Image: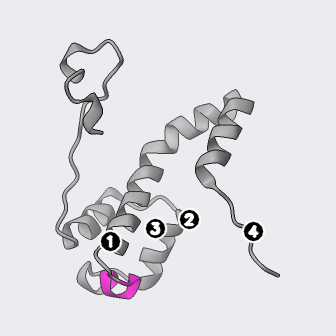
């Protein structure tokens, strides 16, 4: 049986519009989802296989696969180890509101 292609961003927008409960749950997990998506994007951009990333990050290929499938919430220590092995680092950034004067000059950078 062939897999059905799903456009996840559209599905999330649809579900958040339909359900306040889903919207609250999504807001709680959105940062983690986006971080894991970015790790996967960078791996592909670097033309690394999951196995190669596993080798350079002292992980298993299965761990990388589970991370990319978002099947579990990896420990921060695990994410840092993988990100560092690709030559990146995690940076905390203050959330900006529309009225935040300090962020107005940086709003278009993100």
Over which residues does the magenta segment extend? 49-54
- Number of marks present in the image shown: 4
Instruction: Kindly indicate whether the residue at mark 3 contacts the one at mark 2 (C-beta within 8 angstroms).
Output: yes
Task: Say which residue label 2 marks.
Answer: 71
102 to the left or right of 66? left
Counting residues from the start of the chain, the first of labels 3 and 4 encountered is 4
Give how far across and how far down residue 66 sits, in percent.
50, 72
Counting residues from the start of the chain, the first of labels 1 and 4 encountered is 4
Instruction: Kindly indicate whether the residue at mark 1 contacts the one at mark 3 (C-beta within 8 angstroms).
Output: no
Q: Which disc, if any, is residue 67?
A: 3
Counting residues from the start of the chain, the first of labels 4 and 2 encountered is 4
50 vs 18: above or below: below
Task: Say which residue label 1 marks.
Answer: 45
Quarter holding residue 40: bottom left
Give the CA separation, mark 2 to mark 3: 6 Å
Give the CA separation, mark 4 to mark 2: 19 Å
Residue density around tag 4, few if under 14, some if 14–19, many if 20 or more, within 10 Å: few
- Quadrant containing the N terminus in the rendered view: bottom right
92 to the left or right of 9? left
């Amino acid at each position: 049986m062939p897999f059905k292609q799903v456009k996840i961003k559209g599905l999330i927008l649809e579900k958040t519009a339909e359900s306040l409960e889903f919207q609250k749950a999504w807001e709680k997990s959105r940062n983690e989802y986006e971080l894991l998506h970015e790790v996967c994007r960078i791996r592909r951009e670097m033309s690394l296989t999951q196995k190669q990333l596993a080798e350079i990050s002292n992980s298993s290929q299965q761990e990388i696969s589970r991370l990319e499938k978002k099947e579990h919430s990896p420990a921060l220590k695990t994410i840092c180890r993988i990100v560092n092995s690709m030559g990146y680092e995690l940076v905390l950034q203050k959330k900006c509101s529309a009225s935040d004067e300090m962020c107005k000059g940086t709003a278009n950078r993100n």
